[in-house]
Image (cartoon, coloured by chain):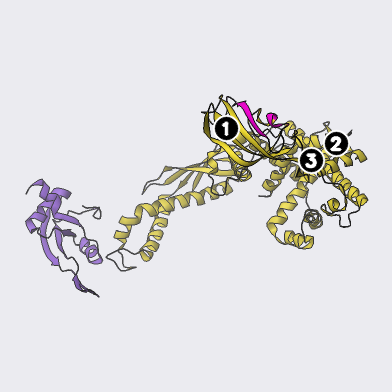
């Protein structure tokens, strides 16, 4: 995977109550590019944060449908990745990622 | 809490305070818990934000806030413990400010100087006195007439002091220049509002005359392209009017508040006013001399911070006087202009406070009321004003300190030798004018010592 792609895979941290709970189990949640694959995400996290990754699960979050007086519309969805770090690794300053 | 005090100069103190790390951490933790309940973050319900997230996001800010608060609190505690009497505001610098270490900070402050008052024994003070003669009153009435003078059109050549209504246009060579033309301009001859030579050459002009006037702009004229140039003005004179002094008749007298227009009453009124002026002038002069002597007799190191405060106050006053408006940034004015005045005022204020303390002077409510009544005579409804003064603690305090100050000055004068010097009315006022600035100063001084 080339360097350029590394910077395009991870879109940013995903900070929610659920993500905060997950962080206690060494899982960190990211928004990722729509076409990112698990191996790509694993490599990107390892390259950017220098931490060993044990596993990645991904899912697509669908946008909500919103109805206005002009008819129905669809909000943008996104792809979310739960990255489990290898035992003993932690991400300290998580909120500031790309 | 550990406190150590260093004496860096006569009035400057430096205190170093240590606050245990545990105390700081505890304060930070409590503050963070408050924050956690209060803030809203996207992705979290209010009040459900995990502590870890709050700490990560707000930890630094909260700590800074807590630290500066703690520094202030401990500064106050430190100076009370060490019984220091600070003048002005301290400058507080954190020395060690790290998580897990004891917080250490240094506060530099100035304390009020210990004053050993030396009196003004043996100084001589001049008290001007003036008898108001009939001639003085006549002069005063003349002046009043001059103030009420009106300009009346006359059919004669213009003289110095007359007002002329003119159109003019200025030429450099043959070219008219910008800003050199006006119509229907009213110009008082001899007021020196125009370029030198312009007004003089209009003397002798009649209504309807057309004149051309040659003048040279002064070298320091504000419009640069005109400075030093020779110019010709074409002037058309429309009207010449002369100053007409009003007669001293019933109407004239009524304007000054004597209802029945009686000339004798008017003279008595004028005399009263003049006598009051003389009294005030004499009082101010004496007070000024006493304060000057006091200031010379005592050498006091004045805290820089007080001077700075005073300077700022003076600057604001100055800005107000020049009509610069509320939002004018006073820090634009240079400090140096006011520093000396400020120093004197602070010094006099400190010394007077000491005099008051030493003689255990106090002002009773009756004395305050008397002074308030005096002030209130200027208003429409004196009783209301007096009541207002007596009820408002701040205003009452102001008057009280004015009374105290006068008492202090009286005490000082007991030590000094007061010579009566008789002068004419004008001389007294002139002398007063010289010390007027100084007099204004101690009026402001009054407002300081209240604070």
Task: Indicate left or right for B330 with B384 as reference.
Answer: left
Please state which of the two labelled residues, at mark 1 or mark 3, is closer to the viewer. Answer: 1
- Between residue A25 and residue B227, name the one nearer to us: B227
Is residue A85 something one can see in this rendering?
yes
Secondary element at tag 2:
strand
- Between residue B205 and residue B30, name the one nearer to us: B205
Q: Which residue lies at the image location 53% right of the left edge and 41% below the top edge?
A: B331
Give the chain ID for the yellow colour: B
Q: Which residue lies at the image location 13% right of the left edge and 48% below the top edge?
A: A47
Residue B210 among those drawn in magenta: yes
Is residue A46 something one can see in this rendering?
no
Q: Which residue is mark 2?
A: B127
Distance from the alpha carbon under mark 2 to that under mark 1: 56 Å
Q: Which of the 4 image quadrants contains residue B199? A: top right
Secondary element at tag 3:
helix
Residue B50 image point, x, y percent: 30, 63
Q: Residues within 10 Å of mark 2 (few under 14, many from 20)?
A: many
Q: Which residue is mark 1?
A: B170
Q: Which residues are magenta?
A: B200-220
Distance from the alpha carbon under mark 1 to that under mark 3: 51 Å
Please give the label number shown on residue B284.
Answer: 3
Residue B99 image point, x, y percent: 36, 49
Residue B148 among those drawn in magenta: no
Give the chain ID for the purple colour: A
Disc 3 sits on a residue from what chain? B
Residue B247 image point, x, y percent: 85, 46
Q: Which of the 4 image quadrants contains residue B204? A: top right
Is the residue A21 above or below the residue B93 in the image?
below
């Amino acid at each position: 995977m080339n360097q350029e792609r590394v910077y395009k895979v991870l879109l940013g941290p995903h900070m929610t109550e659920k993500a905060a709970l997950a962080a206690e189990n060494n899982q960190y949640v990211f928004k990722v590019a729509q076409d990112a694959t698990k191996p790509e995400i694993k490599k990107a996290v390892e390259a950017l944060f220098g931490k060993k990754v044990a596993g990645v699960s991904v899912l697509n979050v669908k946008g909500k449908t919103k109805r206005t007086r002009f008819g129905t519309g669809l909000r943008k969805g996104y792809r979310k990745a739960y990255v489990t770090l290898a035992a003993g690794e932690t991400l300290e300053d998580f909120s500031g990622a790309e | 809490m550990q406190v150590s005090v260093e004496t860096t100069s006569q009035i400057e103190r430096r205190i170093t305070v240590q606050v245990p790390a545990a105390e700081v951490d505890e304060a930070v933790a409590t503050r963070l818990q408050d924050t956690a309940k209060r803030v809203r973050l996207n992705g979290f319900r209010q009040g459900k934000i995990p502590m870890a997230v709050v700490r990560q996001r707000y930890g630094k800010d909260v700590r800074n806030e807590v630290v500066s608060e703690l520094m202030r609190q401990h500064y106050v505690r430190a100076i009370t413990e060490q019984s220091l009497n600070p003048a002005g505001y301290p400058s507080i610098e954190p020395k060690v400010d790290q998580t897990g270490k004891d917080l250490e900070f240094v506060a530099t402050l100035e304390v009020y100087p210990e004053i050993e008052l030396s009196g003004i024994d043996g100084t001589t003070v001049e008290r001007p006195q003036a008898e108001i003669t009939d001639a003085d009153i006549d002069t005063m009435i003349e002046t009043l007439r001059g103030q009420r003078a009106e300009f009346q059109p006359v059919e004669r050549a213009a003289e110095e002091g007359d007002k002329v209504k003119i159109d003019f246009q200025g030429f450099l060579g043959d070219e008219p220049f910008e800003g050199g033309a006006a119509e229907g301009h009213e110009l008082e001859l001899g007021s020196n509002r125009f370029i030198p030579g312009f007004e003089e050459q209009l003397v002798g002009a009649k209504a309807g005359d057309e004149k051309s006037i040659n003048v040279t702009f002064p070298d320091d004229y504000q419009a640069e392209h005109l400075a030093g140039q020779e110019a010709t003005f074409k002037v058309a004179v429309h009207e010449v009017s002369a100053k007409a002094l009003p007669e001293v008749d019933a109407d004239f007298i009524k304007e000054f508040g004597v209802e029945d227009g009686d000339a004798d009453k008017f003279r008595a009124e004028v005399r009263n006013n003049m006598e009051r002026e003389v009294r005030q002038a004499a009082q101010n002069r004496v007070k000024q001399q006493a304060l000057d002597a006091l200031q010379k007799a005592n050498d006091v190191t004045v805290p820089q911070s007080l001077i700075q405060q005073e300077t700022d106050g003076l600057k604001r006053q100055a800005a107000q006087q020049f009509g610069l408006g509320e939002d004018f940034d006073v820090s634009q004015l240079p400090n140096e202009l006011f520093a000396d005045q400020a120093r004197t005022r602070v010094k006099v204020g400190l010394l007077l406070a000491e005099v008051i303390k030493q003689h255990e002077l106090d002002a009773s409510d009756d004395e305050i009321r008397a002074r308030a009544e005096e002030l209130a005579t200027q208003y429409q409804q004196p009783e209301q004003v007096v009541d207002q003064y007596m009820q408002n603690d701040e205003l009452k305090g102001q008057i009280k300190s004015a009374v105290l100050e006068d008492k202090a000055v009286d005490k000082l004068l007991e030590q000094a030798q007061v010579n009566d010097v008789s002068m004419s009315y004008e001389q007294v006022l002139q002398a007063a004018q010289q010390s007027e600035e100084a007099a204004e100063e101690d009026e402001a001084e009054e407002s300081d010592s209240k604070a």
